[in-house]
Amino acid sequence: MRTSTYTISLAMLLTAAAAKAQMVPIGAVGQGEAGASSEPVYYFAGMDSAGLAVDRETHPDGAAQWSMFDDAAGAYVDLTAADTVAVGTEGRYRLTLTAAGTTAEWTCLCFAPQVTVDVARLDSVNCTNAYLLAQATAASPTYVDPVSGIEQTIGLTLGYEWTVADTLTIASADGRATAPSPTDSVLCIVRATSSAGTWAEDTVRLSAYAVSADFDYEVRGRDVPHEVSMEGAWSAPVEVELTQKARGSITAYEWMMGDAARLYEKNPVYTFQKSGTYSLTLTVTDERSGCSATSEAKSLTVTDSFVGFPTAFTPNGDGVNDEFRPSYRSLKSYHLVIMSRWGRVVYETHDPQTGWDGQTSAGKAPEGTYFYVAKASGYDSGVSFSLKGSLTLIR
């Protein structure tokens, strides 16, 4: 702590209160007076921009001479003969005005109180909050009052401001602050500022302690030709790639795939085979700190099985309805047989993605009525289809 004490003979001072108005502080952030002091005490945020000026409105006449009291010499030392003077050093300054053979003097004290951060640390931490603590000292200006001869101290107050990870600013009257428990290593800066405007800073680095959970998922390889789609839903089998976006020192992952499965890999891939709407969540844990977190749920819908056929097609090569094929989704097995009206098989397939283009081994099938028989099963247990009907080939 820095404390300065200045002593001066009473013979050097004017005791008239009105005399104080002859000095104007430049850059002062406050003025303090204690006891029965006959002179003002100015304090500044820094001495590099501090100054004093003659109040010419109050005293328009007189040649100015500034001086500063030298403790070692026990006397004033002249500084400059001008209306203003730079205050580069703490201490007692004197203004002498001389006009028509008359001399008057005024004095003041100038200070830039120093601030020191004595304590800056993490007080405690849990999975939700980190509790920060700082304590600082402001060196209050001390001087001997020229009237009473009593040592006086200008009392200063302190305020604190914490900045956490360059994003969160917390004002504090007592140096204590509560911040979210970090999921990554973060730097905290505390600034202690005195009522004089002087300040000091210190830093505290917080290690990762808490965790947070988030993830994305992506459906892989679902560009299936001619499959009937549903907005926001997928046809089985649905292969899903899960990517964790958790933060913190994660040591364990737990994925809940609705009621379908529970997984423990970091970035798993899972295939849904049954229809339904699944609520997907990720829970992460830092076993060192004991903290865990669960993500918001994300929904995935797998459609139920379906298969249906048109009643006609036109294999004329115009690119529209050129094949007889099913509309379907979520099929596990499939078998289609198409026959002429006389019962001869003209087309057969086990792949719902392909269709009959109206060709037979003998060439183009003639226009007319044909018949089909189809059997299929879905991914849901016990779901099967047995369909038959007629179709018209139009050329």
Image: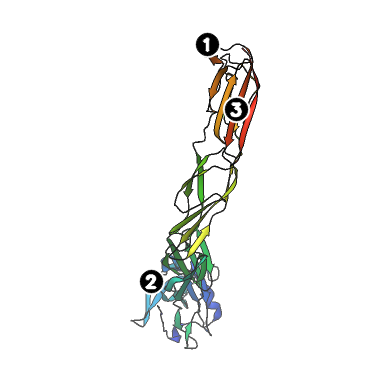
The local crowd at label 3, few if under 14, some if 14 to 19, many if 20 or more residues have their Cα within 10 Å, is many
CB-based contact (under 8 Å), mark 1 and mark 3: no
Q: CA distance from mark 3 to mark 2?
A: 110 Å
* Quarter that holds the N terminus: bottom left
Residue highlighted by disc 2: 79
Mark 1 / mark 3, whichever is N-terminal: 1
The local crowd at label 1, few if under 14, some if 14 to 19, many if 20 or more residues have their Cα within 10 Å, is few
**Where residue 240 sits: x, y (%)?**
50, 43
CB-based contact (under 8 Å), mark 1 and mark 2: no
**Nearest to the observer: residue 307 or residue 28:** 307
Q: Residue at x 51, y 69 (%)?
A: 177
In this view, which residue lies farthest toward the left?
A: 72
Q: CA distance from mark 1 to mark 2?
A: 120 Å
Residue highlighted by disc 3: 374
Q: CA distance from mark 1 to mark 3?
A: 23 Å
**Nearest to the observer: residue 339 or residue 210:** 339
Tag 3: residue type? Ala
**Foreground label between 3 and 2:** 3
In this view, which residue lies farthest toward the bottom?
A: 149
Residue 274 horizontal side relative to residue 101, left or right: right
Element type where label 2 sits in the image:
strand
Tag 2: residue type? Leu
Element type where label 3 sits in the image:
strand
The local crowd at label 2, few if under 14, some if 14 to 19, many if 20 or more residues have their Cα within 10 Å, is some
Residue highlighted by disc 1: 362
